[in-house]
Image (tube, rainbow, N blue to C red):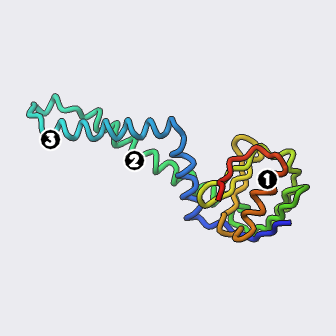
């Protein structure tokens, strides 16, 4: 059995939310497009002589909105979620056995069979255990320490859909 104790802090949670948002292809495309719009209109305004009324302000404004609003929106949503979901801030003990995945918080207990897990994903600093396509339990990899190879092997043995690192 793997047992780990963790408490999720806001800064790492925010970093994970940015990472999850910006790995979405649509968000990436929109960010690149906004950057190109902003830089293109800025370069055009600085180096092409023209009357003030012909300046491409709409492209510049669009670029600023895309580059400013998206990160602010992710920050605001993460801050709101972190503040409004007390379970995110609690100390949680995870017990991971061959049979089930158990969470014991300060105000709750949850248990689920591995057969009901949608998928497991390993990121650089996180293990995400998805209950469905949108909801995941967040386990900081640093808390797993030397139990990480054992966890990887257990997930492989159980045949759970997973994206795990090899090392």
The residue identified by callout 1 is 155
Which residue corresponds to the image point at 22% horizontal and 40% vertical from the top-left?
42
**Picture disc at residue 32:** none
- In what element is the residue under mark 2? helix
Residue 107 appears in the picture as rendered? no
Extreme residue toward the right, this view: 99
Residue behind mark 2: 68
- Residue 138 in the image: state x and y as whole percent: 69, 57
* Front disc: 3 or 1: 1
Q: Nearer the viewer, residue 141 or 166?
A: 166
**Residue bearing the label numbered 3:** 46
Q: Earlier in the sequence, mark 1 or mark 2?
A: 2
Give the crowd class for mark 2: few <14, some 14-19, many >=20 residues within 10 Å.
few
SS for tag 1? helix
The image shows residue 129 at horizontal and vertical percentages of 74, 52
Spot occupied by residue 75 in the image (x, y as percentages of width and height): 51, 54
Crowding at label 3, few (<14), some or many (≥20) Cα neighbours within 10 Å?
Answer: few
Work out whether residue 18 or residue 65 is closer to the camera in this orientation and state it: 18
Viewport quadrant of the N terminus: bottom right
Q: Earlier in the sequence, mark 3 or mark 1?
A: 3
């Amino acid at each position: 059995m793997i047992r780990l104790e963790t408490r999720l802090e806001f800064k790492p949670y925010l970093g994970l939310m940015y990472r999850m948002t910006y790995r979405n292809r649509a968000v990436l495309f929109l960010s690149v497009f906004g950057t190109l719009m902003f830089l293109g209109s800025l370069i055009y305004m600085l180096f092409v002589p023209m009357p003030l009324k012909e300046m491409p302000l709409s492209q510049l404004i669009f670029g600023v909105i895309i580059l400013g609003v998206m990160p602010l929106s992710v920050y605001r949503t993460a801050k709101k979620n972190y503040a409004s979901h007390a379970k995110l801030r609690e100390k949680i003990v995870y017990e991971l056995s061959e049979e089930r995945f158990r969470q014991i918080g300060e105000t709750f207990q949850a248990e689920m069979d591995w057969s009901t897990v949608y998928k497991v994903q390993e990121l650089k600093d996180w293990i995400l255990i998805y209950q469905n396509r949108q909801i995941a339990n967040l386990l900081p990899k640093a808390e797993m320490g030397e139990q990480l190879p054992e966890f990887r092997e257990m997930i492989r043995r159980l045949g759970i859909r997973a994206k795990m690192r090899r090392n």
